Image (tube, rainbow, N blue to C red):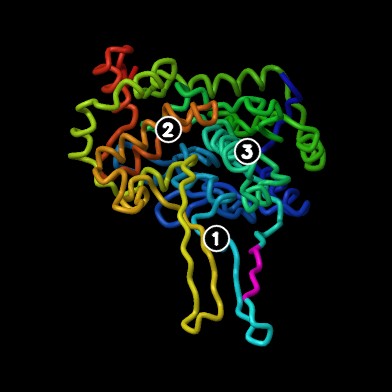
Amino acid sequence: MGDIRILNPPDLGTLIAELRARGYRVMGPTVRGDAIVTGEIRTVSDLPRGRGDTQRPAEYRLTERDDRSFFGFAAPAISSKPVFFPAEEVIWRGRRDHDEGHFTVERDRPDAAPIALLGTRSCDLRAVQIHDKVLAGRMYEDAHYAARREHTFVVAVACGQPAETCFCASMGTGPRPAETNPETGEAAYDLLLTEVLDEHNHHFVMEIGTEHGRQVADAIEAGDGDEHDHARALEITDAAAKRQTRAIDTSTIHGVLRASVESSRWEEIATRCLACTNCTLVCPTCFCTTIQDVSDLAGDEGERHRVWDSCFSEQFSYIHGGPLRGETKSRYRQWITHKLSSWEDQFGMLGCVGCGRCITWCPVGIDIVEEAAELTRMSGLGSGAARS
């Protein structure tokens, strides 16, 4: 157990103000339309206080709570991914210089303001760590991602309200974040909050993960906590883990998918899958992109844009002569096999964090957990249990 502090509800606004005063752009959960998404947080009133959610296969509903909880919901509809890896961005701009007779190209520079993630769930924090390795941890880093990710301050919030579609406990990614990044060994967060709300108390147990986090905690004069407060925080996340009914057996799924290339299950899934790309667009770890070049009518100015793409798109695998994965069954097979098997071969980790968004936002309610279980049953390599 590290340094434990206590943060009262009014102090949450003080924390936001302190981070903004230090030059951070604070990003966290907020209500937009009929959903909780990740957006800019300027004051405590931007947080979804008293709001919850109901998530089931093909169903998302924003709800009113009968308490004043700030974080009484599961994973937001939009994760932290677009904060560092936006859906569309300009890579470079070019302009024709008629006097000099050449074309000048300038790389676009992302906003250099450091980001403070506030209220980040454990699953989404793990997804950011995965992107750190995929996009910034290899020989050729994504310069735009690395620039946005630099100097990030993380205020994670342990989850006490899992949705019906959540399965992070089985993936080892929540509801409470690990203290360190498993790839780097560095601290996973600067501060970790667990919201305690019962008949007599409403406060946050604050755990300090870094010296930078300690400085912020000292600056807002967060009160001291003790081992009993820490034990209460653990009780909340342990209870949240036990309430999760979906699970994937990570000890067998890699081999199951390798053995299921010719499974008849793919045909059955294809009769339901719309190939709409929803699952990949809401996924916090998907990173497929394409390039779009645009110019003015005169051809004097041009831009190259990078935009999100999806392996469910027929054109995504297009090469000379046609797409490699022209059938829906092959696209779904590619997606789930990459998430739960070949991603591990590539990067040494699974590409799924158990947030359940792909289940919630699939228009026909296709459930990655149930499909993994059925493939496991058909392969004979495991128990095949999708739910406990």
Looking at the rendered image, the disc whose residue lies closer to the viewer, 3 or 1, is 3
Residue 111 showing in the rendered view? yes
Nearest the eye: 276 or 205: 276
Marks 2,3: beta carbons within 8 A: no
To which residue does mark 3 refer?
Answer: 138
Q: Amino acid at mark 2?
A: Lys
290 on left or right of 204: left
Q: Which residues are magenta?
A: 103-108
Residue that mark 1 sits on? 89
| Residue 224 drawn in magenta | no
Q: Is residue 268 left or right of residue 275?
A: left
- Position above or below: 103 against 327: below
Circle 3 packing at 10 Å, graded few (<14), some (14-19), many (20+), is few
Q: Residue at x 37, y 50 (%)?
A: 316
> Can residue 174 be seen by looking at this rendering?
no
* Residue type beneath disc 1: Glu
Where, quadrant-wise, is the C terminus in this rendering?
A: top left
Q: What is the distance, in whole Å, between disc 2 and disc 3 at their CAs?
A: 19 Å
Image coordinates of residue 266 in percent, x first then y, are: 23, 32
Instruction: Identify residue for label 2.
Output: 339
Q: Report helix, strand or loop for mark 2.
A: helix
Disc 3, disc 1: CB below 8 Å?
Answer: no
Q: Earlier in the sequence, mark 1 or mark 2?
A: 1
Q: Is residue 339 left or right of residue 226?
A: left
Q: Nearer the viewer, mark 2 or mark 3?
A: 3
Amino acid on which the number 3 mark rests in the picture: Arg
3 or 1: tag closer to the N-terminus:
1
Q: Quadrant of residue 205?
A: top right
**What percent of the width, then of the height, locates residue 322?**
29, 52
